Image (tube, grey):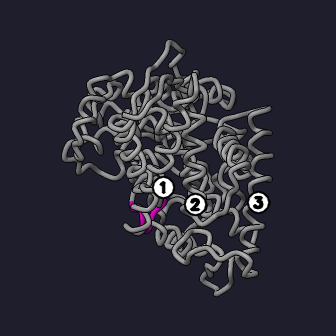
Amino acid sequence: MKSNNSIPQDKTLDNTLALLQEGFQFIPNRRKQLDSDIFQTRLFGQKVICMSGKEAAELFYDNERFQRKGAAPKRIQKTLFGENAIQGMDGEEHKHRKRMFLSLMTPERLDHMVDLTLKQWKDKVTEWEKAIDVVLFDETEEMMCKAACEWAGVPIREKEVNQRSKDLGAMIDAFGGVGQRYRQGKHARKRTEKWIKDIIKEIRSGKLNPPENTASYIIAWHRERNGKKLSSQMAAIELINVIRPIAAIGRYITFGALALHEYPETYKKLQEDNEEYSKMFVQEVRRFYPFGPFTGARVRKHFTWKQCHFKKGMLVLLDIYGTNHHPDLWEDPDDFKPERFKNWEGSPFRFIPQGGGDHYIGHRCAGEWLTVMVMKASMKFITTEMEYEVPPQDLNYSMVRMPSIPKSRFVIRKVRPK
């Protein structure tokens, strides 16, 4: 096997610190410097290939060439994903587990999630009328946690909602965190797994009987290809992998509210109850704002692509943020333009906010439809069912911090129903 001399080299001894210092721009910066959508660098003490763009995404999601096993660092498994969960599975085992998640996304269940979300908004607006300042990000994280638990058939008492939502948020926030942020995410993961594991045990013992179409029921009784139920620990991890991403929608909603504020013409267009524009707006929020920086896989077997040699076992990072802002794929990529999604029939490898490729056989997020529907309902509620003011505050968001959010977490005041 030849060396990777066909791949442009970022020859720094190790770029782990640079990754933490540059965040979402780490791969795009080097793509520009090296004038290449593919380059090799060193991260975490190992050689890594970084890729960006539509063709790179098509390659990355080729399951014959790449595998997810061994790609996610243990530090991310111990906070964000959970150890040995679906994100690290491949082949028939992955497809079988993925079908379990997709079975949750029926039209009826998606509509129910929208209804639960709207109920949360109505309850919160009544509560916010009495408040001086409302920190929207904190509130939407809590709202989405509560709605997610009810939708998934997970009982949660009112007095514990705040702590549970903070734990889910800490797990998400630990993705690019070090020191205290990482430790908080790790402790939050342990608390959440214990909580959900006890619920799985109660379902299996008959003490708890959630509806059969809910995630808690389906995951508790799911059987793997060998006919065995998931261990209570693994069932808990996968149930968290339903609840946690829904709680994360609070971050998207906050960025959506920021877009309404920064681009007031979009607010008026959303008020017109235009279904097409609503979807265009939501998709542009998901494309434009920093959410997921990159995702990883390992090379399954030696192969050559465009004269570049990929060695078995090598870690490869696909640039999610950079692909969604790639100048060869998007006109004026750094401008917020919902109209770019008018009559959108683009490639599933060009627009990859929650992974690329096929939902059914690939690694694209099973909950993407749910995310879009919940965001559309939330944006419609914000623009047509409530009024509020945005006081002076620091609405800048860091392109270094992963994940990012406006520094003020988007404060609103004088909230009232329309």
Q: Which residues are magenta?
A: 358-363
On screen, residue 180 versus residue 155, left or right, reads right
User: In front: 268, or 375?
Assistant: 268
Residue 362 belongs to magenta span: yes
Is disc 1 surrounded by few (<14), some (14 to 19) or many (20+) residues within 10 Å? some
Question: Please, what is the three-letter code of the amino acid marked with disc 2?
Answer: Glu
Tell me if label 2 and label 1 are in contact, CB under 8 Å: yes
Residue 259: quarter of image: top left
Question: Please, what is the three-letter code of the amino acid marked with disc 1?
Answer: Leu
Residue 150 bears which disc, if any? Answer: 2
Q: Is 124 placed above or below 257 here?
A: below
* Chief SS of the magenta region: loop
Task: Give the residue at mark 3.
Answer: 195
Q: Is 182 placed above or below 208 here?
A: above
Question: Please, what is the three-letter code of the amino acid marked with disc 3?
Answer: Trp
Task: Give the residue at mark 1.
Answer: 116
Q: Residue at x 51, y 27 (%)?
A: 25
Residue 36: quarter of image: top left
Residue 54: quarter of image: top left
Q: Is 17 placed above or below 100 here?
A: above
Disc 2, SS: helix
Q: Position of residue 229 (x, y in %)?
A: 68, 81
User: In front: 41, or 113?
Assistant: 113
Which tag, 2 or 1, sits closer to the chain's start?
1
Closer mark to the observer between disc 3 and disc 1: 1
Q: Which corner quadrant holds the C terminus? A: top left
Q: CA distance from mark 2 to mark 3?
A: 15 Å
Residue 288 belongs to magenta span: no
Q: Which corner quadrant holds the N terminus? A: bottom right
Which tag, 3 or 1, sits closer to the chain's start?
1
